[in-house]
Amino acid sequence: MASIGAALLSALCLVLALGLGWHHPLVGAGSALPIGLIALAAWRWRWVALAAVPALLPLVDLTPWTGWLLVEEFDLLLLAAAAGAYGRLAWPAPEPPAPDGGVPRLPAVPLVSVLLVLLALGSVGLSMWRGVADAGGWQFGWTQGYREPMNALRLAKALPAALLWWPLWRAACRQDLPGAQRLLLRGLTLGLAGCAMAALYERLAFTELLNFSSDYRTTALFWEMHVGGAALDGYLAMTLPFAVLLGLQARGRADLGLALFTLLLAGYAALTTFSRIVYVALPAGLALMAVLVVRQRLAGRDADARRQLGAQLLPAALLLAGFAVAAFFVFGGAGYRGLLALIGCVWLMLPLAHEAARFGRAEWSAGLLLGLVAAGLSLAAATAVPKAPYIAFGLWLLASGALLAWRLRQGPPTAGPSVLGALALAGFIAALAAMVQVADHWGYAKGLAAAWPVALLLFGVFVAAATQPRLRWPAAPRWHGLMATALVAMAAMVAVFGGGAYMTERLSASEGDLGGREAHWRRGIGLTETAEQQWLGIGLGRYPEHYAMTAGPQERPGDFRRQAEGDRAWLVMAAGTHMIGWGEILRVSQRIAPPEGRLTVAFDARADKPVNVHVDVCKKHLLYDDGGCQVRNLEVPATQGQWQHFSQRVDGEGLPPDPWYLPRVVVFSIGSETGAVPVALAHLSLKDASGRELLHNGDFEDRGSGGLARWFFSSDRFHLPWHAKNLAVHLWVEQGGLGLLIAGLVWLAAMGRVTLGSAAAQPLAPALAAALLGFMIVGLVDSLLDMPRVAWQYHVLALVALTLQLPYRSRRGAVRHSISPPVDTSARRGPSA
């Protein structure tokens, strides 16, 4: 029966994926090929469903290009992967016998977990039904907005989609629990890496990499933030702990390298969100994770093993604290250049201290003498060669690092002095001196005063670690790699808070912002007026509509709808009654090909009162443009119900060119600047100097994939009408007190199992606990569950936490699977954690 069910589910997923893909606005029937290939790959390789789907979650979405809100490309990916994976389950391979004759089995899912998941599914289903009914009943539309019936289905799909993935996870755990957990760990880390790389591109393309004074806040590829929200914040909080765990449990260089690379990028992405709640959620989650990891590793170990673990943690804490203080002083006097030089010196010091522990008097004497000579040469060159301090620092750092690496590759030292070691020591001393020169060159007396005490202190720490065994940090490359990554993250935090006014201003405004948030929350709670609404909510997806309908005369948000009559269709837009500036315009946009020369915009319009129609063409990622837009404002007079044609040149000679390695998207947008006055627009056209038409579906008649296919709306800076800005308030309003209670019990049960319950000993438990805590902290200031991809990720992690269990053998003996790396077990008395 299980095989028949898997086969039927596989066929259903494939048919659904192909049916949805057929209506895709960009490729249509051409989507059948990638869907089929993904299904075949998932049938052949288990990692496609377990690792590739989470890895591609933050990347696979073309909503700004398609205009689809109900269906995303991630939905097609998940359905295709599920079709292949369930097809594979329909023809299961026999389980290999265990060495002791038993077969590993997973216990049944705890009954409490099953009941909680069923209650959550029932609450979502009931709220979806109420949301559709509240919006006027079932009216299907591919491109319906947030105030129309299909928005209820858009928000409801996340939990069923997570439940579609969960049996595949359980099936993989039955076959190979350690392998399944490694796949999930790598998939989440790869997803975080992709998200962070998208954020890095965005910063490079639209603001300077180290510009921490601009109010530009990254969104990566989370289009859900087109009307604000904390999609990126929530995703970072849920996935960064898994990258840390991969680094801690890496079995080879590939996993360790992936973890370190991801953490470096993700740390930068987290800092450049300029989100105060991210700066709370990530440290809180990682602190909880550290406690749980230490508890796991201490379980069943004797005093020697505990001391060994302490020898890894205490030096890390002391080095991080000391580096934070040193970075603060150096950055204040020598800026980014001095800070980067400090990081390089500390990186070199970490492995060099262990090599220096083997030095005799000859190596120390030769290294000190040669280092002083090299420092003197750098000082002399600084008076004759421009930028000499930077060149000298780079040369000495690279030379010392190369010599040290050459020495370490030779294996255990032979008898006699180490020439390579002495030369590496000399290079380290010269690099310290060059760091001081860099600070002096950039910050003059202030930089010099900040850098030279730090250089002396750094050399003192190096000598102490090399000569005193009790002060020495671990020699393991894994410890060095994680420590180096943590140092970069610490330096980035110093730069963000010390290098720009934007974050300082946001922190100083926290108290005032909290008052505004509290008023917004009270207003949201007030949307539930009857006892029935307070218990069951107003329905999924109905917050934006009820907020707009109860808004005061000076704060109503804008809206847009497609209307049709006969063979003609048009777009009706109305601006809000709030203050409308450049960032507050409700824009309906389309991604277009790069234009050539001057642009001409044309459209038919009708309005009962005069309206100012705003048109702009910008290079834009999602919310913020680069400031070099081509703009036109057109006055549409009262037309007494008649259509009038308008055609005007757009101001500006053209958009600035992009470098070939950093292309940016060109976006056409149209909106109204006249509050509460509807204007109807038809036959939209945008042509460049060559006469080429740049817009698609300008007549809004693409019925195959929705009348508003290719059109996407955004509100750059006016966000309150679209989100409750608190997870509990969001659940209360849309699912009622009952839905809030069920969601809270699910979170508490999941958190309890991976911190204090039966799953606490599992290798994934610390990261799951950190992710759940981080998600809830971000949820204090944002809704999160009203963004399907973020909600899917949360539901997946909650399901894994609720059902994570240790396997047992069907014949005799209990076993525990671990994905932790091999460690010294000579003093261990208990089973592996």
Image (tube, grey):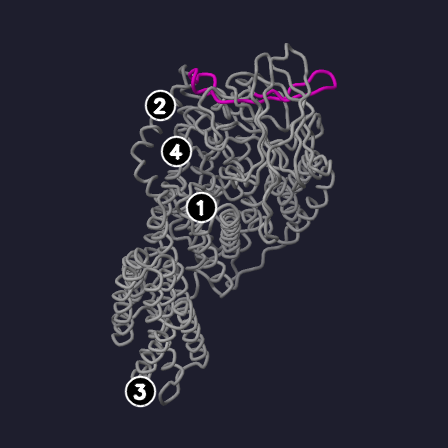
Q: Circle 2 sits on which residue?
A: 522
Q: Give the farthest residue toward the bottom.
A: 416
Identify the amino acid type marked 2. Answer: Arg
In the picture of the structure, the residue carrying the numbered disc 3 is: 362
In terms of depth relative to the viewer, which is nearer, 703 or 666? 666
Helix or strand or loop: what does disc 1 sit on? Answer: helix
Residue at mark 3 to residue at mark 1: CA–CA distance: 50 Å
Q: Nearer the viewer, mark 3 or mark 1?
A: 3
368, above or below 458, in the image: below
- Furthest toward the front, the residue is 384
Q: Earlier in the sequence, mark 1 or mark 4?
A: 1
As helix, strand or loop, the secondary structure at mark 4 comes to: helix
Identify the magenta region.
547-573
The reply to whether callout 1 and callout 4 are in contact (CB within 8 Å) is: no
Residue 52, position as x, y percentages in the image: 58, 50
Which label number is shown at residue 288? none
Q: Are marks 4 and 2 in contact (CB under 8 Å)?
A: no
Decide: is 137 above or below 687.
Answer: above
Mark in the foreground, 1 or 4: 1
Residue at mark 4 to residue at mark 2: CA–CA distance: 20 Å
Q: Position of residue 732 (x, y in %)?
A: 41, 25
Q: Amino acid at mark 3?
A: Ala
Q: CA distance from mark 2 to mark 3?
A: 74 Å
Residue type indicated by callout 4: Gly
Which residue is at a point 65% across and 49% down the rendered structure image?
88
The numbered mark, 3 or 1, whose residue comes first in the sequence reads 1
Quick check: is 559 in the magenta stretch? yes
Quarter of the image for residue 427 reads bottom left
Q: Which mark is residue 744?
A: 4
Q: Quadrant of residue 595?
A: top right
Q: Between disc 3 and disc 4, whose residue precedes?
A: 3
